Structures are given as structure tokens and as C-alpha cells.
Image: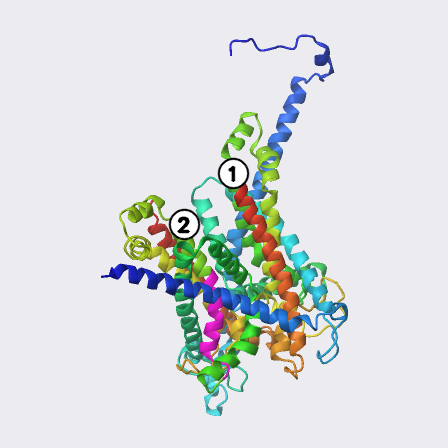
Amino acid sequence: MNEPIETDDSGVENHSVPVITHEKQKVVYFSRRLKNVSALSLLFISGAITVLITLGIFIFVFKETTPLILHAEQRNDMSLYHNTEENDEFERTASIFLVLDNIFGQSRWQPVDDAPLFSIWPLAVGTLKITTVALVEATVVGFFSAIAIAFYLPRQLRYTTKVVFELLAGMPTVVLGFLGLMVFATYFQSIFGTTYRLNAFVCGSVLSLTAIPIITTLFEEIYAGFPKDQIYSAKCSGLYDYQIITYLILPATWGKVFAAVLLGFGRCFGETMVVLMVSGNAAVLDLSLVSGARTMAATIGSEMAEVVVGDTHYSMLFLLGTLLIVATYLINFFSQLLIRKWTYD
Amino acid sequence: MIDKRIIIERLFSLVTSFFAMCVVVLTTFIIGLVLINGLDKLTWDFLTLPPTGTMDGGGILPIIEGTVMLVLLMSLISVPFGTAIALYLNEVSSKGAVYNYTMSSVRTLAAVPSIVYGLFGLAFFVNIMGGGLDFLFGYEERVFRERCLLWAAMTMGVLTLPINIIAVTEALKMVPQEQRHAGLCFGYTSWEVIKWIVFPQAKGGILTGLVLSVSRGAGEVAPILFVGVAYFIPNFSGELLDQFMYLGYHLYVLATQSPNVDETLPIQYSTTLVLLMLTFGFNSVGQYMRWKNRKKLQR
């Protein structure tokens, strides 16, 4: 501190340093600032691209559904009075209400037909059936597993379990679908003796395997974000672990728990490959859990490859996609809202 | 008299551990099943021969080639963009409305169902970008407006964008704030701080994102179902505007649409094994890297 700073006044080294004139310095400074501004704006543009993609996914998918309303041909295709001869007048002026009648007023999905039926209800019911089964199983198993990992498992086993859950999260869904189709469905039928080998319940069970790791991870994050001193003081007061969970953690994190379940729901109902392979692919309006079913995502997956671009069927499949997007955006919006509301900092 | 709470506690511990162990056993069972059934058919010939006409014999060479090609192209798109977006979010943007909006779009992108990405790929990449390129070059017939490898790779690139963003963001958060301030005090511009101080330390995160997105991309089938994947092409041309075969799609086709499902079952298991080795291999490498990076932070 008290020693003077050593100065280099030999002068030998200084001669090797090139003399920087004022003008040269200005040029260097300017080029550095130019580089800075251009690089930062490039980064800004790529940030903007994310927002554009999020909007663009909705816009471009929705754009392909508009012919259903805007093109007279497709409106006529959709109208159920299309083939009858006495309705010539009707055909020319098929209104949007006939389109809506076909989508919401009927009860069958028969896209390849002279008078195609595009009722959304069989698919909606199928989606609801499969997703409910998957979500209930995934929530129960995921919730309990997260508790076991956080509180009860011995340390070494805890680590192994976490690794296995991460492996399960990285499992391709087509592999799960394949094993569900070849192995699990047969086991299920031989145990419960159901009429159909492939049904909504088997499909939901296999589907829950994709959602379990997600829900477990989200629950673990909730636990990790919980103030540790509160947990320690509860333990010091002599509370058992189950009391800490039910009296302390759950009441303070209900919103986040619900958000985690919502995100699991979003994962389940958009899943395609498992449903395509295990659900039995029957688009029928049937509330039974042990009959075949089909979700909206699986319908897109199985029919889009064979469809003519620009067809009525094509637009209809894009309408299903639009519904999926809207549902995803809503789910995400509400789960983020819940998480923000239930976070105290 | 035993306390009631002890019994509940024991019961609770048993039930929760039972469910956790169920998942562990099930996952082990799945992997074991694929290993046992898939190993005996997994020979060198299986990996280096094209499949035969009815798909009940031969190997999976063009399928592996198609998968590797698509995954490479995909990472060429998603890694630079993901890195740039993560850099913007963490280094450039002020934490205001723009930051919040971009962040929530990233979260939304991560939650969009993969089949919707397929619709987006068909509607935007194939129809609009492909159609636009055809119009630009003045082609009468469809050249770019076809379902092909290029558009499939771009679709997959958009799908894996959030994975890259999240991985790089994690790495960027581990760079100490003091180092950035020190750089600014030396008279660095913001870009020079990113280039010389932040970026070299975030390289691990970029690599992690690459590995994880490869693992995810190789396992996804739904987004490319109708953006260029083909049922059967015995010789993979390697050209961008051609259709291609894909490992996951091949498994799906074999399991649901081949004429004789039972006879091709060994091939299906071997294909599954190759797919699992690819995805699990990359996934475990990525998770290991992530774990190592986190450990570095704790020190």
C-alpha cells in the first residue's frame, strides 16, 4: 500500500509500442462501436424470431383452415345437403352455418366419403378419455414418486431413481408405442380379459409413462424452491414428514401443483405416436374406457399423409391442429399465471 | 400404545417408495426387453445393408443414413439460433416487457405438441417457403415445394430450438456477474464482453444443448410424418430435396403397416435397440455434461 507504484522509465520497451494517433484511435473506436451495435441487433433479431415463430405457428396453421369458411367449394363439400338433387339452390349458397352444423351438429368422423362427415365430437371424446386416464395415472405416480425422491428414499437409491426418471423422459415415444402395442396390450388383455386388445385404457397407461417424468420433475422443482428453513423448523417441532407435506408444503403450493398437472395435461393430449399405435384408432363416439378411441393429434398424424393439399379434409385437419395450438397456448398461459401468482419473493 | 402418526408415516413412506420403484422397475423392464429381444438380430450386416422389398429382411443402412443426415442438418439450424436467442435473453435484453414476452414464447414453444410442428412445417416451410423459392427461381413444376429432407430438418430445428435455448441459458447463468462488470470497466463494449468473457465459458452449455437436441430429434417422429419422411427408399441419395427414411418412422411402419408383423418382430426389436442406443447414448452424455457443469457451479 505504502510502496510507490513502479514505473517503467527505462524507455526501451516504450519505443516498441506503436504511436497511436488521435485519428487512428477514432477509427478503431468507431469500428468497435459499429461491431457492437450490429452484433447486438443481430442477437435482437434472433430473439424476435422466437416470438415470430410462436405467433407464426398459429398464423400459418390457422391460415390453412380459412378455406373452410372462405371458399364456396369447401363449404359445399362440408354441407350435408351436398348430394341431394332437390337442394341445388342450397348448394350454391351453402352458408357457414352448414359448415358449423357438420363440425358440431353431427356425431361421426367419416372423412373419406361422398358426403364426408367431420364431426369433432368422437375425436374430442377420445382425446378426453385417453388424456384423463393418462393424466390421473401420471399425476398419482408422479406426485408420489416426487415425494419419495424428496423425503423417503435412501440417498443412493434416490440418485439412481432420478437418473432412471431422466432416462424415461428421454425415451422416444415411438418406442413406448411399439412396446405398448406388442407387449403391454397383450398383458393387459390377458389380465383383465377385455374385448378389444387396443383400447383407451391401455393407451392412457402407456401415455402416462411419457408424462410421469415431466410431472415428477415439476414437483421436485416445487420442493426445491420451497424455503428450506421452514422445512427444518417444522422438523425441529417434531412433525413427521407426511405432516410437513400435507400441512406445510401443499397448502403453500397448491397453485404450482395445479400448474404442473396442467403442463402434464398439455404433454398428454398432444402426444401422437403412442396414441397412433396403441389406441386402436377407432373414431367412434363411445364413453367406455375399454373400447377403441382416437385423439385429435393422432387423427392429424394418420390422415395428413394421404390427403390432397388444399382439400376440404386437409383444411379440416388443420382446424384440429389449430384447436391443439389454442389449447396449448391457453394451458401455458394459465400455468404461467398460476406459477407467478403462487411465487412469493 | 403406538402413536397413530408413526403408522401413517410408515404407510406414506411405503406407498410413495412403491410408486417410485414401480417406475424404476418398469423402465428397467422396457430396456431389458428391448436388449434381450434385439441383440441377436443386431449384426454388422443389419447395420450395413439396405432393407429388402417387403421389409422382412435386410438391414437398415439407408434409415441410419437418413436419420444422421436429418439430425446434422437440424443441429446446423437449431444450435446457432438457439445460442443467439439465449445470448439475447440473458446478455442483451433489459429485463422488461420484451424479455418477459420472449421468455414466455420460449416456454410456449417447448410445450407445443410435436404434431403441430409438423403442420407448421407443411404450411410454412413446404407451402410458403418452398412455393416462394419456386416462384423466385421461376420453376414451372414443383422443385422446392415438395416434402423433403430440407424442410423436415428445418421443422425439426424449430422443434429443438427451446432445448438449445434452455441449455445455453443454464450455462450463461453460471458466468459470474463480476466478470462482466470487470470487462465493462476495462472499456469493452457489450459485444466484446459477450465474445471474450461470456461465450468461452458458455461453450459447454452449447455442446450440452447440441447433444440433448440430437437425442430429442432422433426420437421424434410426429413432426416429420408428413414433411418428407418416406415409407420405403432402398438407396438414400443424400440430396436435400429428396425424401428419406427415418429410424422412428421405420419402426412405426414395421409395427403397424408391414404385411407380416409377427415375422418382422425381431427386426422391429433390433430397430428399437438401435434407436434407443442413439437417443439414450446422446441423452446420457448430455445429462452427464449438464451435471458436471452444475457441479462446477457449486464449487
Which residue does the numbered mark 1 point to in the structure image? B299
Name the secondary structure under disc 1.
loop
Q: How many labels does the image show?
A: 2
Left or right: A157 as drawn, with respect to A223 = right
Instruction: Find residue B7 and report its horizontal and vertical position in percent.
Output: 29, 62
Residue at 36% from the left image edge and 50% from the top image edge: A340
Name the residue nearer the viewer: B260 or B280: B280
Image quadrant containing the N terminus of chain B: bottom left
- The image quadrant that residue B138 belongs to is bottom right
Which residue does the numbered mark 2 point to in the structure image? A224
The disc placed on residue A142 is: none
The stretch drawn in magenta includes residue A203:
yes
Q: How crowded is mark 2: few (under 14 residues within 10 Å), some or many (20 or more)?
A: few
Q: Which amino acid does label 1 sit on?
A: Arg
Q: How is the image coloured?
A: rainbow
Chain under disc 2: A
Chain under disc 1: B
Q: Which amino acid does label 2 sit on?
A: Ala
User: Can you name the residue that lies furthest to the bottom here?
Assistant: A85
Left or right: B231 as drawn, with respect to A119 = right
Left or right: A293 as drawn, with respect to B223 = left
Q: What stretch is highlighted in magenta?
A: A197-213
Instruction: Find residue B198 and report its horizontal and vertical position in percent.
Output: 57, 37
